Amino acid sequence: MQSIKHILIDTDPGVDDALALALAFMNEGLRIDLLTTVHGNISLAQSTENALKLLSFWGKHIPVAAGAAVPLTGKTVTALSVHGPNGLGGLELPDPTCSVIEIDAVTAMDRVLKKADQPMTIVAIAPLTNIARLLQQHPEDREKISNLVIMGGAWGRGNAGVLSEFNIFNDPQAAEIVFNQGLTLTVLPLEIGRQAQIKKTILPTIAASGRVGRSIADMLAGYRSGSKDAFNIYDALTMAYLAHPEYFTLVPAFVAIETSGRYTRGASLIDDRGKLKQSANAKVAKSIDSVAFSHWFEQQWQ
Ligand code: RIB
Ligand code: CA
């Protein structure tokens, strides 16, 4: 009997976020106990509306709590050129039949963690503002977080800056806080999404799989991340990790976040060779078995 893993997801849906959510719902070994929204790809308001619309359209009933509209310092940076003007690749979904719960994201995460009888996995697929605030306001909750799986950072070239990945770039102060809490962190940087692209030829298979698949295919049609023939679906790799951690090669590393560099704000220096003389604060994915991942991904839509 497979044990059920209870998770929290912090998200800025976003097309690859929506794909990650869909894959989470397809995994019978996962229970999403709470969805929290945050600024990032789009505004907080749009992020929250998108989350509610996706859950309503898919007939999924889980609590949604809205979080931070802006980073800890500075202004948010959206990614409308990647995710389309509404954040869902231009797909217009019906108005949601559900609404956010009356408490904010940090309060909701705190209550869920405190109530849990086992430590939980948090999946962070957006700027880390909500997570940082949770850890600042409720440091006691750290013992109830068994693993924080983060889509973020880059070993090398960024997507938001020369060396900065979008989620970290959007709130480097939050990322610095999160990486310095002594939590078990599993980091899936940009390179993993670039190694495990999905080919655009899979769109008809996804669309033919049913209501969820049709909406995912429609969103991907308006998603601008990847190449002529394939998509980078960064956030979705967190769900591949939860389903099949064996696909990933992780190395212990000290991840330093540049918070103030004139040209390097939001850069994640992933030191797996002791250059910075700091002990490791995360396990970072260096590679993925992209053949096994592609086979797994295709199986999800059969
Ligand atoms: O850099 C990729 C990340 O930024 C993903 O989470 C994507 O949704 C965007 O938020
Ligand atoms: Ca995201």
Image (cartoon, rainbow, N blue to C red):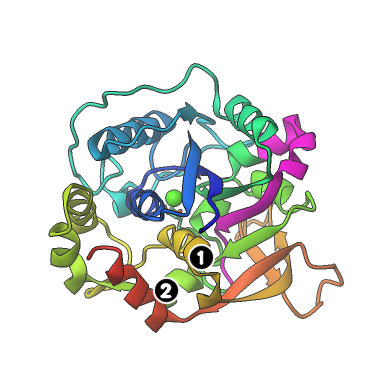
| Relative image position of residue 295 (x, y in whole percent) | 33, 77
- At mark 2, the secondary structure is helix
As displayed, is residue 130 above or below residue 178? above
As displayed, is residue 111 above or below residue 127? above
Q: Which residue is mark 1?
A: 241
**Numbered range of the magenta stretch:** 132-155
Category of crowding for the residue at label 2, using alpha-carbon neighbours closer than 10 angstroms: few (below 14), some (14–19), many (at least 20): some
Can I make out residue 5 in this image?
yes
Corner quadrant of residue 19: bottom left
| Relative image position of residue 220 (x, y in whole percent) | 23, 57
Q: Nearer the viewer, residue 189 or 276?
A: 189
| Relative image position of residue 131 (x, y in whole percent) | 63, 41
- At mark 1, the secondary structure is helix
Corner quadrant of residue 248: bottom right
Category of crowding for the residue at label 1, using alpha-carbon neighbours closer than 10 angstroms: few (below 14), some (14–19), many (at least 20): some
Rendered residue at 77%/43% (across/down): 143
As displayed, is residue 49 above or below residue 263? above
Q: Which residue is mark 2?
A: 194
